[in-house]
């Protein structure tokens, strides 16, 4: 799977069903060649400008339960 297919997907916390934001970036473990963390941020839309990131939170990739067509479900909300 390419990272570009993960970008802009909604991230939902499974236990509470709460919306955390959209995948914007990732931290890569170069030694293992794997994604270590997903960077999640809510987009702030403005009428006059492009969308901007409000704040970014990092979620460990090991907490990802399922990657679906439109959303990503995570088990625990461990923010860094």
Image (cartoon, rainbow, N blue to C red):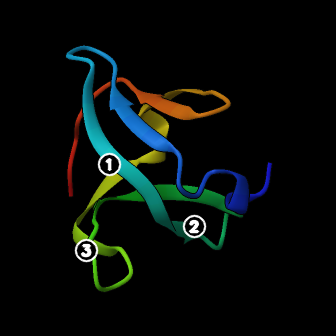
CA gap, disc 2 to disc 3?
34 Å
Residue under the image location 45 percent in, 41 percent down:
10
Mark positioned earlier in the residue sequence (1 or 3): 1
Mark 1 neighbour density, 10 Å: few (under 14) some (14–19) many (20 or more): many
| Residue that badge 2 annotates | 29
| Residue that badge 3 annotates | 46
Residue 60: % across, % down: 39, 47
Mark positioned earlier in the residue sequence (2 or 1): 1
| Residue that badge 1 annotates | 21
Mark positioned earlier in the residue sequence (2 or 3): 2
Report the quarter where the C terminus lies: bottom left
Q: Residue furthest top?
A: 15
Q: Residue furthest right?
A: 1
In the rendered view, does 10 fall on the left or right side of 21? right
Which is more toward the observer, 14 or 18?
A: 18
Q: Residue furthest bottom?
A: 49
Residue 20: % across, % down: 27, 42
> Are the two marked residues, 2 and 3, in contact with CB atoms closer than 8 angstroms?
no
In the figure, residue 43 lies in which quadrant?
Answer: bottom left
Residue under the image location 28 percent in, 67 percent down:
45
Of badges 2 and 3, the one in the foreground is 3
Which is more toward the observer, 48 or 41?
A: 48
The disc at residue 61 is none
CA gap, disc 2 to disc 1?
23 Å
Which is more toward the observer, 15 or 30?
A: 15
Q: Secondary structure at mark 3?
A: loop
């Amino acid at each position: 799977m390419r990272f570009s297919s993960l970008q802009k997907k909604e991230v939902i916390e499974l236990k509470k069903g709460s919306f955390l934001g959209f995948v914007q970036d990732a931290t890569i473990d170069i030694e293992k060649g794997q994604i270590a963390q997903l960077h999640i941020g809510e987009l702030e839309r403005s009428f006059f400008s492009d969308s901007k990131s409000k704040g970014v939170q990092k979620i460990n990739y090991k907490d990802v339960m399922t990657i679906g067509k439109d959303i990503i479900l995570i088990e625990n909300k461990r923010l860094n």
